[in-house]
Amino acid sequence: MIPNQWYAVIRGQDVKRDKPVGIMRLGKKLVLYRDTEGQVACLQDRCAHKGVLLSKGKQHGDAIACPYHGFQYDQQGKCVHMPVLGKCGVIPRTMQVPSYKVHEQHGLVWLWNGEPQDSYPEVPMFTNFSEYKGFTSLYGWDAPIHYTRYVESVCEVYHVPFVHKGSFLNIWDPKGGRVDEFRCSIDGHLITSDFILRPDDDRSAQETLEAKFPWQRGWRIGVDVLMPNLVQIRNDVFDVYLVATPIDDENTWVCFCYQEPKKDLLFPFFKPLPIPLWRRLRPWMMCRMERFIQQAKDLEAIEGQWPRASSLKANNLIPVDKVNAYYLRLRDKLIRDAAENRPAPAAPTIPIQLVPQAADSPLETNSL
Ligand code: FES
Ligand SMILES: [Fe+2]
């Protein structure tokens, strides 16, 4: 896990007024709730008195009350009321719960994994999504694999012809998993790649892109990683991003965000539905398909993968795994920098296009 970064920990819509929610993220038990202004507060989910889960308690105005003896804590984790002492009781200074800096943006609640700072960087987000005006759907769930393995699996799609072959409505159901015209570059915290996934036949890459039927076709796909844990997949049908936030050393909270498909290739038979409903329904359905169809297939293949956590040493990477290699190297570097108190590299500035113009930068010569 990389220190001094924003991590998405829960969808904003899952943190409600008067209903504290307990989650495990980044190896920490957390309780989140909305104060009377609607701002999200985040405390350690453990009462400073006798260790009871605060998420089982009730909200009292801006404070959250422990269900055991009713001690109340404000948004900063300071105990503000101990019923057993009465109104005039003196509250010990040690009656304090750790609080965490959180920020709500892009439909997600982000937690700062690091020391408090005078000013904080922007939360990471792909411009394809931060500037998008159409409908999106966000859907999160827990996956029983290490987050580095999750990131790794979505950073390369040449497993699709093997793992997802025959999946329900899989437009990629392809004849082969050959990768052509692979390009990859790195800029600050952003790794960008672009390639054609195509059948291994005698046609040119261009001919496969122009094939008449989806199942004969090659696909131009972009895969990007934005540190610390966001991955975007782009093609001419849809854009999607996901965050893979560690729950603990064994599990990952995955949250997918789909845009409306750019083409009606996937579900033409739903077209008679009223337009606004149809536009909302498609990203909603894509998210559920990702969890219950695509990810189920991924897990069948990669559950049991070892070592549990990925690293450069844990794999024998090939040139088309360059996104994996860059991610693992950049991750190592950011962890080292944080340990040595070095400033993070500049935030990415290049907008992402379907076909990036950046030249290929060979792995061997790229210095992280
Ligand atoms: S354990 Fe929370 S108030 Fe006693
Ligand atoms: Fe997959």
Image (spheres, rainbow, N blue to C red):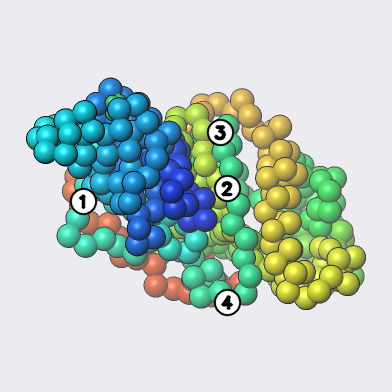
Q: Is residue 154 left or right of residue 40?
A: right
Q: How far, Cα to Cα, is label 4 from label 1?
A: 33 Å
Beta carbon of the mark 2 residue lies under 8 A of ligand 2: no
The three-letter code of the residue at mark 2 reads: Gly
Asked if one can make out residue 244 in the rendered structure from this viewpoint, the answer is yes
Q: Where is residue 253 in the image (x, y as percent from the top left)?
A: 52, 42
Q: Residues within 10 Å of mark 4 (few under 14, many from 20)?
A: few
Beta carbon of the mark 4 residue lies under 8 A of ligand 2: no
Q: Where is residue 298 in the image (x, y as percent from the top left)?
A: 68, 39
Reading the image, the residue beneath label 4 is: 133
Residue 98 falls in image quadrant: top left
Reading the image, the residue beneath label 3 is: 145
Q: Is there CB contact under 8 Å for labels 2 and 4?
A: no
- Residue displayed at 43% across by 43% down: 20
SS of the residue at dot 3? loop
Of callouts 3 and 1, which one flags the residue occurring earlier in the amino acid sequence? 1
Q: How far, Cα to Cα, is label 2 from label 4?
A: 21 Å
The three-letter code of the residue at mark 1 reads: Pro
For residue 42, above or below residue 209: above
- Residue displayed at 18% across by 48% down: 341
Q: Where is residue 357 in the image (x, y as percent from the top left)?
A: 53, 75
Residue 317 falls in image quadrant: top right
Reading the image, the residue beneath label 2 is: 140
Q: Which of 66 and 355 is in front in this view?
A: 66
Q: Position of residue 170 (x, y in %)?
A: 81, 53
Mark 3 or 4: the one toward you: 4
Reading the image, the residue beneath label 1 is: 116
Asked if one can make out residue 159 in the rendered structure from this viewpoint, the answer is no
Mark 3 or 1: the one toward you: 1
Q: How far, Cα to Cα, is label 3 from label 1?
A: 30 Å
